[in-house]
Image (cartoon, rainbow, N blue to C red):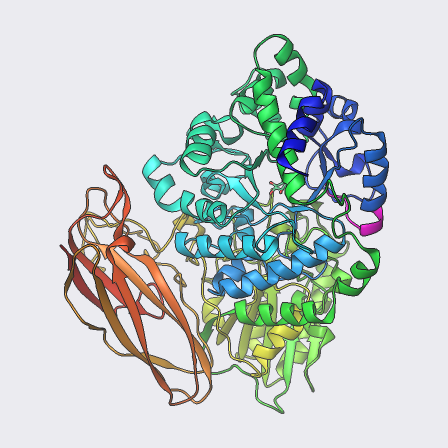
Amino acid sequence: MTEQKLRELLDDLSLEEKIGQLVQIPGWHFEDSAAVTGGDTQADAQLRYKPLAGSTLGVLGAEKLRALQESYMANHPHHIPMLFMLDVVHGLRTVFPIPLAQGGGFDPALAEECARAAALEAAVSGIHVTFAPMCDLVRDSRWGRVMESPGEDPLVNGLMAQAMVKGFQGEHCGEKDRIAACIKHFAAYGAAVAGLDYQNVELSEQTLREFYLPAYEKGIRAGAELVMTSFNLLNGVPASGNPWLLNQVLRREMGFDGVLISDWGSIGEMVPHGYCADLKEAAEKAIHCGVDIDMCSGAYAGHLQELIAEGKVDISLIDRAVWRVLVLKNKLGLFENPFKDADAAREKELVLCKAHRELARRAARETAVLLKNDGILPLNPGEKAAFIGPFAADAPLHGGWAIVGRDEDTVKLKDVPIEGAVYLPGCTLLDNGMVYNTGSYWEEDHEAKNAALLQQALEAAKSADKVILCLGEHRMQTGEAASRADTRLPGVQRNLLEQVARVNPSIALVIFSGRPLELTEQEPLAKAILYGWMPGSEGGPGLNDLLTGVCSPKGSVPMSFPRSVGQLPMSYNHMRSGRPARNPAQPFVTRYLDVPNTPLYPFGHGLGYTEFTLSPIRQDRSAIAPGETLTAKVTLTNTGRREGTATVQLYIHDVTASRVRPVRELAAWQQMTLNPGEERELTFQLREEMLRFPNAQGFASEKGKFEFWIGLCSDTDNGSGFELL
Ligand code: GLC
């Protein structure tokens, strides 16, 4: 539709129709099978707008959505098509590794491919908009939603956000088999105080701008059509009614003029937050902050009309919001084709298709991280392996935000057995009575059941050459509303490891989790640790490719593994101490008395089945002025006996600045696959633009000394220095 026609349509709408475009109603009010990702609130107010609602979420299926669109439009006074939205976060039916794992892949191209495949499955299933990518920077694995983030580094998060937006939208979201992307959760939800959902974030503007905002901005600059507000307070003001955050930062500074949608109920939650007296005030504050769509809180449905009648909200604010919604529908081509790509035949052909499964298998193997290996992996042909643990049996591998993924579509380790290997559960997945975010979990005869499972497992372990212990979290112990104060493996699994270690010390741990678990007690008992995250539909084959040595692990740590949950929040790009601990005997320095003040596994760490060496840095100059380039070279050599992929990382540190700078900041990386004995010279270019940061000059570099390192992990000591003139 032309802009002129769209304007005419807007002008022709009644006030009720306009408000309807700003109301998003839960999908179950249209279709019983809709995915549930929030609670029902103010249903009555919303249901009054059901015939006029501009969008819904959670409904899936080409035929269902075509039928819904047809009936809805027939009854709408101006026959305006509805938007169908869904959380397609790491796949639709073909489930890919969780975004945290994809962040550790350090491979934006792979993330784009996964998003592209997810978009295709979603589009033919009738979906127009996905609530992804989530770009919240994370430093605290107590928070359940770290699984949804690419991790703790601003550069990785930003490049992943760009890649996923491109994968979902292509060059234009109206293209065939593409869907509109939504950057979330704006803003800084990942800094949740104490790792608790729906509550508080306290950040200085410096920290917010330095670490948390860049990824959202990169996603917006990549063309994301929507942004979603977050549940949290930001320094005392809820994000969904925060004028500085939404009007100043998002709209004016970042230049975002697309659709701003609230999170589920987050406008209404400004009342329990204590920021608004009632839903009416919440609606007034949100619309003044440019929140265009109210997701399921009922505030807009229940109060916008009276706010306009009372002169508290000007109709121009409503028109502005409706215009953004209509523009999005127009970009998607819905006025010409309200069904877009919904096609039952193609849905049947493409959802879970072979090509997507192969991609899921590749993604599972390329994002897994080999944290430790004394040589026990890969398994050698003919070796007798005992796969023991809940994840060697039926535990689900599809992550918590695979909301329409199905366990029965998942290929697990036991489904692709290695010749001669045995597969045993060893214990229940959770301790008795453990709760995960959709309710409590317990098993009858828990103790009796576990005693029997343990006995069976120990027998198998005794007679095996190697034990592959497959342990981890339940998929619903991570994700939304899944904060944990104790991030260790369940006690019943820790006991299994201890008991098995007594009968056979040749143990490789394979961990499935949505967060970096606290593994300090388990680490000494394992000769190898392969972190599979939540690998998705092809987790079994993907990890088998690594365990059998068909492929070599190449993933890296996207988020620091703490030695203790007591160290959280933590990240590699922390600030320097005024009293750095230079040796354990030193008194009065920055340290914990009870654990080393370092991660168990640092950001950027990741092993393969070969060894690499890096030469010292060779650089062409020791100083640069703005506009000049310092060229740094290293030689990477595969000194092992197998092909392998190295992720070579460049870190920079500004030694002295008007705002203290992080001890290290990732500035670039290169991935390189080398055969045994092969060597390759890698070149990194350092320029003044890379040294800028938020300061009194706005966003600028400051002259002086810089250190930099090029290595295979954030704690590399392969360093040098230069001066910015
Ligand atoms: C949830 C989540 C958000 C999701 C939305 C719709 O509460 O916070 O990430 O996109 O509701 O399901």
Looking at the image, residue 274 sits to the left or right of residue 76; the answer is: left
Q: Is residue 315 magenta?
A: no
Image x and y of residue 485, in percent: 51, 46
The quadrant of the picture occupied by the C terminus is bottom left
* Residue lying farthest to the top in this orientation: 310
In which image quadrant can residue 501 be found? bottom right
Q: Nearer the viewer, residue 209 or 276?
A: 209
At horizontal 71% and vertical 77% (from top left) the residue drawn is: 416
**Residue 102 in view in this figure:** yes
**Residue 472 in view in this figure:** no
Q: Is residue 63 magenta?
A: yes
Looking at the image, residue 152 sits to the left or right of residue 545; the answer is: left
Image x and y of residue 349, in percent: 79, 65
- Indicate whether 133 appears above or below 363: above
Image x and y of residue 605, in percent: 40, 67
Q: Nearer the viewer, residue 679 or 318?
A: 318
* Residue lying farthest to the bottom in this orientation: 382
Quadrant of the rendered image holding ligand 1: top right
- Indicate whether 513 appears above or below 320: below
Q: Which residues are magenta?
A: 57-64
At horizontal 52% and vertical 47% (from top left) the residue drawn is: 223
At horizontal 29% and vertical 57% (from top left) the residue drawn is: 664
